[in-house]
């Protein structure tokens, strides 16, 4: 009897100490350095709509011009839509054929960079693209933190994607982002020397 009580107490202590908890989240630096563009996905691993919803919530934390939030997303998760998008990313098709989710990002024009309908400065609609890039950055970083991998694709057929997802004319189609699990470890790209890209004054 005494032995059983001791065993129960030990089990309770281990549980309280986090023995049965999920593995700890990766550090922010681990997310930054382990994120790579993945061009070969594991066909056996799926991602649920609930997981994609959690991921997309992160994009809403991104800053945007005057909080205009011009970014929009169109998520292909059904086999039919996935097959259709695969045909609209040119030479990327083979790279993302096993990705379980493909996400089209757009931004609404006339929002970021504009005040009362007038362009605020020389960058114009470039601010919408800027905001969309920021939002997509949150997406790919959160994806990595959740254990997923991504590939941003600028090579895509914007007109055909517009028809496929019924994207309104006032939105500019930007990237298609593949989401899935890496099937192989990617190479780390060569980066320019920091002093070539950062100047201190
Ligand atoms: C705007 C943008 C467009 C890109 N388009 C493609 C693409 O169409 N196909 C592709 O394989 N990679 C594409 N990439 C991925 C880049 O090639 C990749 O980010 C770069 O080589 C650095 O590698 P890393 O992402 O692993 O750090 C794109 C990246 C960005 C940011």
Image (cartoon, rainbow, N blue to C red):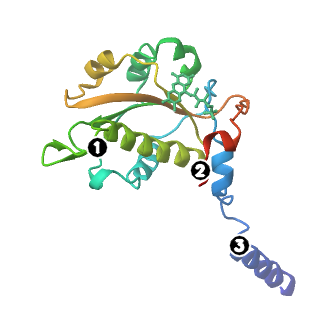
Q: Is residue 15 left or right of residue 47?
A: right
- For label 2, being within 8 Å of ligand 1 is answered no
The spot of residue 8 in percent (x, y) is: 76, 79
Q: Residue furthest left?
A: 116
Q: Residue at x 39, y 41 (%)?
A: 130
Marks 2 and 1, how far apart at CA: 24 Å
Please count the marks in the image. 3
Q: Is residue 94 left or right of residue 134?
A: right
Q: Residue at x 42, y 18 (%)?
A: 156
Q: Is residue 9 left or right of residue 200?
A: right
Residue denoted by label 2: 145
The spot of residue 124 in percent (x, y) is: 27, 38
Asked if the residue at tag 1 contacts the one at tag 2, i.e. Cβ–Cβ closer than 8 Å, the answer is no
Q: Mark 2 or mark 1, which has the lower sequence index?
A: 1
Question: Which quadrant is the N terminus positioned in?
Answer: bottom right
Res. 72 visible in picture: no
Residue denoted by label 3: 15
Q: Nearer the viewer, residue 155 or 122?
A: 122
Question: Which quadrant is the C terminus positioned in?
Answer: bottom right
Label 2 crowd (10 A; few <14 / some 14-19 / many >=20): many
The spot of residue 16 in percent (x, y) is: 69, 76
């Amino acid at each position: 009897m005494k032995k059983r009580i001791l065993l129960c107490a030990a089990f309770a202590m281990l549980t309280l100490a986090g023995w049965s908890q999920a593995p700890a989240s990766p550090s922010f630096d681990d997310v930054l350095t382990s994120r790579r563009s993945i061009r070969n996905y594991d066909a056996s691993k799926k991602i649920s709509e609930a997981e994609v919803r959690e991921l997309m919530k992160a994009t809403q934390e991104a800053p945007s011009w005057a909080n205009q939030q011009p970014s929009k997303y169109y998520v292909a998760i059904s086999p039919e839509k996935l097959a259709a998008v695969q045909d609209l990313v040119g030479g990327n098709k083979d790279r993302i054929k096993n990705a379980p989710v493909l996400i089209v990002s757009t931004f609404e024009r006339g929002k970021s960079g504009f005040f009362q309908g007038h362009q605020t400065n020389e960058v114009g609609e470039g601010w919408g693209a800027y905001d969309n890039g920021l939002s997509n950055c949150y997406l790919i970083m959160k994806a990595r933190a959740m254990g997923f991998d991504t590939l941003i694709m600028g090579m895509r057929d914007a007109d055909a994607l517009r028809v496929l997802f019924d994207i309104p004319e006032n939105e500019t189609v930007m990237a298609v982002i593949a989401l899935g699990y890496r099937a192989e470890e990617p190479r780390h790209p060569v980066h320019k020397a920091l002093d070539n890209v950062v100047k201190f004054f």
